[in-house]
Image (cartoon, rainbow, N blue to C red):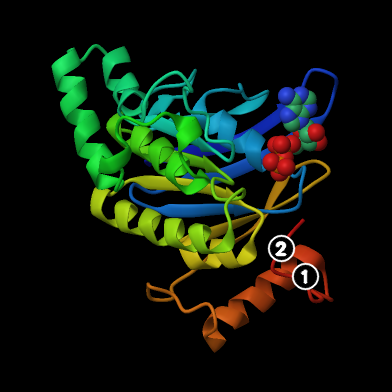
Amino acid sequence: MIPPFLRVRDAGKVYPGGTEALRGANLTIDAGEFVCLIGASGCGKSTLLRMIGGFETATTGEIVMAGKPVTGPGPDRGMVFQDYGLFPWLTVQGNIAFGPLARGKSKQEAGRIAERFVTMMGLDRFARSYPHQLSGGMKQRVAIGRVLANDARLALMDEPFGALDAMTRERLQEELLAIWRSTGLSVVFVTHSLEEAIFLADRIVVMSPGPGRIVAEERITLERPRDVSSPEFNAIRRRLGVMLHGDHPGPHAREVA
Ligand code: ADP
């Protein structure tokens, strides 16, 4: 039998100091699937993401990717953070070439790989620019290009568009979906925004705090591109809003926290 692409089995995390950030999380992610994690602040979304990335160890349970327990970070799992996490001393091209070089590719080969992803991310004109010369949206494109240049099979994205203005955010959501579709990448995407989750995800995983737990999952079968103003979209938004906020979603139901 082929093992699942990614399996989180009974995973729990207690931080030194005693905070129980996550309890008994079970989740299976298929190859090529786009999963969004949503829930109030402090419900363990980042913790679960970092555990899948291998940056945090599970206190109980385990994370298994393609049959192998995750014991640390690896290039097959690329992280994208809200604050970009680019190397400020490297150019766009240098940031994207960094991973391939670190994995032992020759300078020439790493340069070729970087060029390919610089182009894919629409950054040709900025290949020689440094991060501080770029807009937030461009920096996040570099971060995504870096994950792709590593041949990552899974992108772990922690509120990657949270710091961007609404228009840039919408554009990057669409670009991310196009990349996801053309590469077959799996994505686990943390967001505060219910609307963002419904726009992007194949499946939404709802978490709740105290301790962090997975409380529900919802498969989103709306055809893409999704119309955020359609009655179907709104019906899902209302239903998940109630799940996240109780019986009275109120005017701010779109944002979880
Ligand atoms: P979310 O991403 O849903 O906001 P987090 O995973 O960041 O939630 O945090 C879950 C809980 O774990 C919170 O109570 C948070 O304060 C705590 N926590 C997160 N990281 C650490 C850490 N490195 N050390 C101690 N406690 C932490």
Residue 182: x and y in percent read 24, 54
For the question of whether residue 44 can be seen, the reply is: no
Q: Which residue is drawn at 73% across and 67% down?
A: 243
Residue 40: x and y in percent read 76, 52
Residue position for label 1 = 252
Toward the viewer: 171 or 158? 171
Task: Identify residue type, mark 2.
Answer: Glu
Q: Where, by quadrant of the figure, is residue 106 drawn? A: top left
For the question of whether residue 93 can be seen, the reply is: yes
Task: Identify residue type, mark 1.
Answer: His
CA neighbours of label 2 inside 10 A, class few (<14), some (14 to 19), many (20+): some
Quadrant where the C terminus sits is: bottom right
Q: Residue at x 29, y 48 (%)?
A: 122
Residue 72: x and y in percent read 49, 18
For label 2, being within 8 Å of ligand 1 is answered no
Q: In this view, does 147 lie to the left or right of 109?
A: right
Disc 1 and disc 2 in contact, CB within 8 angstroms:
yes
Q: In this view, does 56 lie to the left or right of 105?
A: right
Q: Determine whether the residue tagged by mark 2 lies in a helix, strand or loop.
A: loop
Toward the viewer: 185 or 214? 185
Q: Residue at x 49, y 58 (%)?
A: 168
Q: Determine whether the residue tagged by mark 1 lies in a helix, strand or loop.
A: loop
Which circle marks residue 172 in the picture? none
Residue position for label 2 = 255
Toward the viewer: 60 or 197? 197
- In this rendering, is residue 107 above or below 240? above
- In this rendering, is residue 257 above or below 123? below
Residue 188: x and y in percent read 49, 46
Quadrant where the N terminus sits is: top left
Which quarter is ligand 1 in?
top right
